[in-house]
Image (cartoon, grey):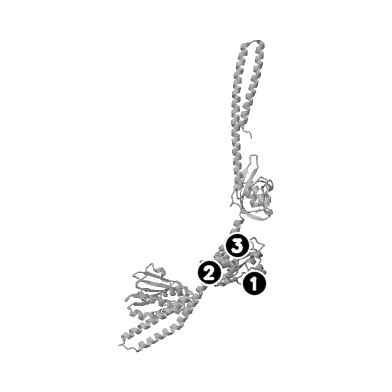
């Protein structure tokens, strides 16, 4: 397009040339007329005027010529800059990884960059000038045309990714893929518009997201049990069918032996083939790649499995036939590593009707194997702990049965001996009293250990029934009345008449009260005070044991109900650290609460609740 300045300069130049031509013609006419009249003076005047006019014309012509040259130089610079800018823009479009496509209002393709060629599989010359619809699945073409027309009429000039729903593209081979797109429009001076779309293939991202969802669902199944055999079957099943067509779990069971665990695929023929392979486990001398992965502790991916590969990693023709029957086309071998120990190898395989495993599949499978390894390790640790618990319970059973009898015999003999001692045998009486106290302590320790074992196993025996509370309180007071009197401790019960019946196991409630009172007696000095209280609070009865002992420091309060915890320092000897823990478990088994209030030097109060019987 020629600029207005350029047109003006051309007009001025033409005018100067025309003026020079007219001047020259007028000079010629005037000279002829003057010559014919013989008037030399007029002739000189005309010649002077024409010379001035000629000089002026030459100057103007030179100015027009110089300006024209300057304008042409600037125009050349602008055109060069424009060509450079267009080249840079085209270069940017060509190196963009995303597809960039421009279309006119009739949705004919005007520009198709290199990213679009890679995404859709078409060369640019195969698409430019053709309808955009060939890049869109047939079922989406109508809605897409309507969308572009609506966008053309809208006031907005662009819509970014995230403002539109996911769309679908169609490659040259007919496959469809999900994509995200941004669209912009450019209004043309003569009317109409050009639309440019930046499109991004998100099929890989979609695949990763779906893989992570499937991984989360698979891992969730690992937490459903801690049984070793069930966990092994779950591990073998985890990757099916979302990641693999089949699997085999080889678990190291000893120094050289492996146990094979097959999954259930739902394909009868494949399940039969997997079962046949599992019936023939391998050892560490086998040529199987499983052994190599087990020893190195590193995963291995085989993208193409053929008969030659199977033959190279089987020991004989029978094993070759069993492995060939699985129909493996691609294999992933994943070591199960937990706490720096290889527990086994998970083999995943795909058949020929699925693409081979790629690097993304391997990364996902390695995450699965890591979680599977820890699940299997936890199951084994649980099995070990359960076995240890069983052995402990067996030992406690021996203690409770075989030791209680001789300890009871010692107590009976001590009491019989005490009855034969006269008043003059004070020293012997002290010795017998020590024997009886030690026997009582031993019996209490055995009972506490058995109760703790029952609590840990969830088998604490509590038989709830409707019982009057006052007889339980009176019975407990009677048990400790003598001991309190020997220490000159004021021991009293404060309870209103007509206490309601409670839902409780009387023997267990007596055990709670006995533990609390025994602790109070241990930590209350001679001449102190212990009070047992009971009161009704709504639909509960609150029982409290308050003493005037040494009290508990604030830093120790959170730990007093822990098993095997005892106050350090100058605490009286004889405690097992189990009494309060057992009391808490018994109260909670009754549906009640237990807590403590204490201040150093001011004593402690332990409270617990029981439900009023309805």
Q: Earlier in the sequence, mark 2 or mark 3?
A: 3
Label 2, residues with CA under 10 Å away: few <14, some 14-19, many ≥20: many
**Residue at horizontal 69%, vertical 46%?**
129
**Real-space CA distance between mark 1 and mark 3, rounded to the nearest whole angstrom:** 24 Å
Residue ranking furthest to the left: 424
174 on left or right of 556: right
Q: Is residue 40 above or below residue 387?
A: above
Where does the N terminus fall, quadrant-wise?
top right
Q: Nearer the viewer, mark 2 or mark 3?
A: 3
Res. 402 in view: yes
Q: Which residue is mark 1?
A: 276
Residue 144: x percent and y percent? 66, 51
Residue 321: x percent and y percent? 66, 69
Q: Nearer the viewer, mark 2 or mark 1?
A: 1
**Real-space CA distance between mark 2 and mark 1, rounded to the nearest whole angstrom:** 27 Å
Query: Is 370 or 319 nearer to us in this picture?
Result: 319
Res. 535 in view: no
Q: Callout 1: helix, strand or loop?
A: helix
The answer to whether mark 1 and mark 3 are in CB contact below 8 A is no
Q: Earlier in the sequence, mark 2 or mark 1?
A: 1
Residue 407: x percent and y percent? 41, 83
31 on left or right of 493: right
């Amino acid at each position: 397009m020629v600029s207005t300045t350029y047109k003006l300069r051309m007009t001025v130049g033409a005018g100067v040339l025309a003026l020079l031509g007219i001047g020259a013609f007028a000079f010629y006419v005037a000279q002829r007329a003057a010559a014919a009249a013989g008037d030399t003076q007029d002739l000189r005047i005309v010649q002077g005027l024409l010379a001035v006019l000629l000089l002026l014309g030459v100057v103007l012509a030179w100015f027009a010529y110089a300006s024209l040259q300057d304008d042409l130089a600037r125009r050349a610079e602008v055109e060069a800059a424009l060509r450079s800018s267009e080249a840079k823009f085209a270069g940017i479009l060509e190196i963009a990884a995303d597809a960039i496509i421009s279309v006119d209002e009739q949705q004919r393709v005007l520009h198709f960059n290199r990213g679009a060629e890679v995404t859709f599989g078409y060369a640019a010359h195969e698409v430019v000038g053709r309808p955009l619809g060939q890049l869109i699945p047939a079922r989406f073409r109508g809605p897409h045309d309507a969308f572009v027309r609506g966008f053309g009429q809208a006031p907005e000039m662009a819509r970014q990714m995230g403002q539109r729903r996911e769309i679908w593209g169609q490659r040259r081979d007919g496959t469809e893929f999900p994509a995200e797109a941004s669209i912009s429009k450019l209004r043309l001076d003569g009317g109409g518009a050009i639309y440019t779309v930046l499109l991004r293939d998100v099929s890989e991202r979609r695949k990763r997201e779906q893989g992570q969802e499937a991984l989360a669902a698979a891992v969730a199944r690992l937490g459903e049990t801690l049984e070793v055999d069930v966990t092994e079957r779950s591990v073998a099943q985890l990757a099916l069918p979302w990641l693999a067509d089949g699997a085999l779990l080889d678990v190291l069971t000893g120094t050289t032996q492996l146990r094979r665990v097959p999954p259930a695929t739902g394909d009868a023929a494949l399940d039969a083939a997997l079962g046949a392979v599992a019936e023939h486990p391998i050892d560490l001398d086998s040529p199987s790649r499983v052994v190599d992965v087990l020893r190195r502790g590193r995963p291995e991916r085989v993208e193409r499995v053929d008969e030659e590969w199977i033959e190279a990693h089987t020991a004989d023709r029978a094993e070759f036939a069993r492995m060939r029957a699985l129909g493996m086309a691609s294999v992933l071998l994943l070591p199960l590593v937990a706490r720096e120990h290889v527990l086994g190898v998970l083999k995943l395989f795909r058949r020929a009707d699925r693409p081979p495993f790629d690097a993304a599949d391997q990364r996902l499978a390695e995450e699965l194997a890591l979680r599977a390894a820890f699940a299997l390790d936890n199951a084994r640790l649980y099995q070990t702990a359960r076995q240890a618990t069983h052995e402990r319970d067996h030992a406690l059973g021996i203690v409770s049965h075989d030791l209680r009898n001789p300890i009871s015999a010692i107590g009976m003999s001590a009491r019989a001996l005490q009855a034969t001692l006269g008043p003059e045998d004070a020293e012997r009486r002290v010795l017998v009293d020590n024997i009886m106290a030690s026997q009582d302590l031993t019996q209490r320790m055995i009972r506490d250990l058995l109760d703790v074992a029952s609590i840990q196993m969830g088998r604490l025996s509590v038989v709830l029934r409707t019982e009057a509370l006052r007889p339980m309180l009176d019975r407990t007071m009677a048990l400790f009345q003598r001991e309190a009197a020997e220490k000159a401790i004021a021991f009293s019960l404060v309870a209103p008449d007509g206490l309601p019946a409670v839902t409780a196991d009387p023997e267990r409630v007596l055990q709670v009260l006995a533990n609390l009172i025994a602790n109070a007696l241990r930590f209350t000095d001679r001449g102190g005070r212990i009070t047992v209280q009971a009161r009704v609070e709504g639909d509960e009865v609150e029982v409290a044991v308050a003493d005037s002992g040494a009290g508990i420091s604030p830093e120790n309060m959170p730990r007093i109900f822990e098993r095997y915890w005892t106050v350090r320092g100058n605490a009286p000897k004889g405690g097992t650290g189990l009494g309060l823990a057992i009391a808490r478990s018994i109260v909670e088994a009754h549906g009640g609460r237990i807590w403590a209030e204490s201040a150093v030097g001011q004593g402690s109060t332990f409270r617990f609740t029981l439900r009023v019987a309805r």
